[in-house]
Amino acid sequence: MFQINENYQKLPGSYLFSTIAKKVSAYQAANPDKSLIRLGIGDVTQPIAPAIIEAMHKAVDEMGHAETFRGYAPDLGYDFLRKAIVENDYQAKGCGISEDEVFVSDGAKSDSANIQEIFGEKNRIAVCDPVYPVYVDSNVMAGRTGTYDAKTETWSDVIYMPCTAENNFVPEFPKETPDLIYLCLPNNPTGTTLTKDQLQEWVDYANKAGAVIIYDAAYEAYISETDVPHSIYECEGAKTCAIELRSFSKNAGFTGVRLGFTVVPKELTCGDVSLNAMWARRHGTKFNGAPYIVQRAGEAVYSEAGKAQLKEQVAYYMKNAKTIKEGLKESGYTVFGGVNAPYIWLKTPNHMSSWDFFDYLLENANVVGTPGSGFGPSGEGYFRLTAFGNYENTVKALERIRAL
Amino acid sequence: MFQINENYQKLPGSYLFSTIAKKVSAYQAANPDKSLIRLGIGDVTQPIAPAIIEAMHKAVDEMGHAETFRGYAPDLGYDFLRKAIVENDYQAKGCGISEDEVFVSDGAKSDSANIQEIFGEKNRIAVCDPVYPVYVDSNVMAGRTGTYDAKTETWSDVIYMPCTAENNFVPEFPKETPDLIYLCLPNNPTGTTLTKDQLQEWVDYANKAGAVIIYDAAYEAYISETDVPHSIYECEGAKTCAIELRSFSKNAGFTGVRLGFTVVPKELTCGDVSLNAMWARRHGTKFNGAPYIVQRAGEAVYSEAGKAQLKEQVAYYMKNAKTIKEGLKESGYTVFGGVNAPYIWLKTPNHMSSWDFFDYLLENANVVGTPGSGFGPSGEGYFRLTAFGNYENTVKALERIRAL
């Protein structure tokens, strides 16, 4: 008789955003006349930029003619895209990353969930708390997290690094030595980040401890301050200890287009085993490339027209961020983030729990946000709003919140 | 110090098609004047059908306007696509599969590699031999296959079911009881298949043994004989023992478009645990949906115009299959497949090894095929040619082979 992967049974409840979606659907069904404003899930609302639309139309046409038709893509991504990535995201910033260190994928969510596969089962993971749920959940599924304590909402074998207002959202080096350290910077959900000097300390720590940093830089396009690094490879020594995950979802609005990439430097090894080679093998065996049309869309992100259009798009969302942050401040809320990231992280008023505030906001302002506790125990008492709505709705949402 | 997943170190050499690609590149570099004909990897060559191109253009336009822009897709796929799948692939064939049993993905390769994740580590897998390499390789990575014997090219914990000319390519029930049984029908690489009665025996066997059949039906569109089932759910009792993988790569030319789906019936359980719920959880945690544009392309596959155009496309490739099969027969080869599948499986002449014949064909006819032994030990002495080339090249390849 076959057996299931018992680790799945350990997962408490369902994926955070599925739970929110269900709650929102139920509320909307019961109140069909209410107009909800969704500032919960980090999903973009602005249309794909014209330069990218043009590139996709062209690629679609190519697929319709035998002379230009493309079948299976190269496992690791088309050269034209890997070249554009290396030139723009790395060489232009002084990071010596080469094309064969770049692995094109269908998005950073898949990569952030799959990357743990190439590591041993006994590795200890460390995560910031609060944190994007996929890092821990994918490790739960792999049996790496021990047992779950429903009371504290923590796993026995996960090292949690609290990031709260008390430590200014800068994680401290943990007491126990981790093997894998997940860092998402600029951070989801808190919208905060580290300076280059602060990140350098983590790189030095990882190299000394023999740990690998899984660096999720999905929000780097939103960085506005000059002392904040866009890539971990801006730090010295990062190539021997860090894997970087990148997404096109937030810098180019690709949440429904699906494209991302992962950088695994060739200098990153375990003894004489190359992690670059391992990830190449995983990619070649379990993935068959991102669609040609989508890779051409990715290439257009780096065109002159694409860059100019996306700069405007990012500015549009950051105007929302400012609107939310300032609106909340004026209403007396304590708020964080929103300067180098499209997320605003607020303290719930009157010590309400995160889920209570979720219900309160949904029912009284018809605004959907994300409960901080959904991202980990240290998120309790906090709440996330995203700047990815459209401007008119964002302004309206803030009016409703102020009127509470 | 972090550890790697040691199972990766057990994998012998690289992925079959990567090896072939490297050999071919090397030959082409050394012989730049030679014109190679590629009948190796199962990659399509015909352009995407007009009805699908039109649907993609429309979807691209939608992504370019705020009113019609789509962000994150529903985890399990858009309703419009799941509805089209259920109506056309299942209800029309009398299989009672419902929309919430269908999980849209970026392709059957990913699904066939990932599906093992929801099963226990100790499960014994059974595979046909020869077989599509991903089934075994993904289980090697998960530590489910024991040790590798380089001499016999087999894994100690894998149950092999030889499919050769001797048993007419019909796998026999294994002596040891497996937990997971991978069946690819119509078969890759042999191009052979089972009748509905023969498949029913496997369904009955699995239900009795408490095993799950992973049924890869990627080639079902090529079935021409009426007693061959298009879906395993045509067999009685399959819903309590089978997961079906489907691909748009071969029936609609989507190898570079990327779309597939997996059916996990709600009746498939382990005790009180639903495998449908487990796969939903995996999908929701580790995947973020297929692109909107691609899902609209998938929908167009089921439109009246799409169906008519794809019927022609399949007929085009099957004409190639006939050309190859008859050409080889006339040249004295012993050949199989090519009637319900786009693959022709031939016995190498003069007891040559599969790789020797690969080199022989590459060097003397400039035709690229796939060595049978790359699909498993029982594939030794066989060779695969695909019908996915264009017609002119296919005819030319056969002329070259005849001239040898």
Image (spheres, coloured by chain):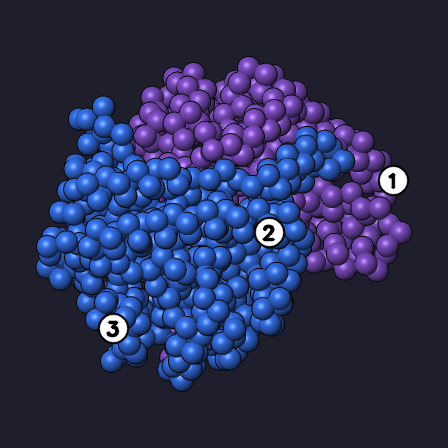
Chain colours: A blue, B purple
Q: Chain of mark 3?
A: A
- Image quadrant in which the C terminus of chain A is located: top left
Q: Chain of mark 2?
A: A
Q: Of the residues shown, which amino acid type is indicated by label 2? A: Lys
Callout 2 secondary element: helix
Q: Is residue A82 left or right of residue A392?
A: right
Disc number at residue B403? 1
Between B136 and B332, the one nearer to me in the picture: B136
Task: Report the residue marked by disc 3.
Answer: A167
Callout 1 secondary element: loop
Q: Position of residue B46 (x, y in %)?
A: 69, 31
Task: Report the residue marked by disc 2.
Answer: A307
Q: Chain of mark 1?
A: B
Disc 1 to disc 3, how far (Cα)? Answer: 78 Å
Q: Position of residue B146 (x, y in %)?
A: 40, 62
Depth-wise, is mark 1 or mark 3 nearer the camera? 3
Q: Of the residues shown, which amino acid type is indicated by label 1? A: Ala
Callout 3 secondary element: helix
Residue B62 lies, with reference to residue A92, above or below; the image says above
Q: Residue at x 40, y 64 (%)?
A: A185
Q: Residue at x 74, y 51 (%)?
A: B357
Picture quarter containing residue A267?
bottom right
Residue B239 lies, with reference to residue B189, above or below; the image says above
Q: Residue at x 54, y 34 (%)?
A: B64
